Image (tube, helix red, strand yellow):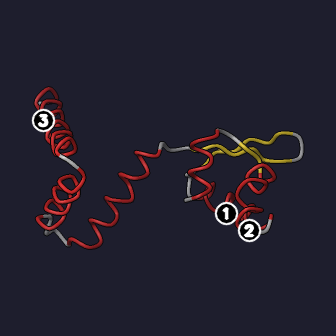
Amino acid sequence: MAVLEYLWSNGEFDTKGVHAVLGKARGISHNTIQSTLERLFKKKLLTRKKVSYAYVYQTAVARDELMGQMINDVVNTISKDNTDGMLAAFVDIAARTDDAHLDKLEQLINEYRSNQHKKS
């Protein structure tokens, strides 16, 4: 996640660039950063292009898209078709922050419903 966060915030980098910022600060070897980038590429979370002798990586998915995929995976694994608990958790999370988040959740629901009616 740290590698993805770094690339989302800073654009494209090669292994040396990512290691210079993340690896050295965390005591992680160049090879570990390189293998992390390779795994993220194989999972289609990064794209890469060859520049001279090195690959330059950039994110292939937006932060919000990945978050949605991850939440969907967790909900499908845990809920087993019982989504009431998941819905209650979303409302609870939104309510714990402030009323603006509850308003945003309501707005998103209304936008979704509006878009579904347009498709029908």
* Residue that badge 3 annotates: 110
Measured Cα–Cα span from mark 2 to mark 3 = 45 Å
**Mark identifier at residue 77:** none
Is there CB contact under 8 Å for labels 1 and 2? yes
Measured Cα–Cα span from mark 1 to mark 2 = 6 Å
**How far from the left and from the top, in percent, is residue 90?**
20, 57
* Residue that badge 2 annotates: 32
Residue 71 or 97: which is nearer the viewer?
Answer: 97
Q: Secondary structure at mark 1?
A: helix
Relative to 24, say whether 104 is above or below: above
Relative to 87, say whether 106 is above or below: above
Residue at 55% across / 59% down in the picture? 1
Residue at 13% across / 62% down in the picture? 88
Q: Quadrant of residue 50?
A: top right
Q: Amino acid at mark 1?
A: Thr
Residue at 77% across / 62% down in the picture? 24
**How far from the left and from the top, in percent, is residue 3?**
62, 55
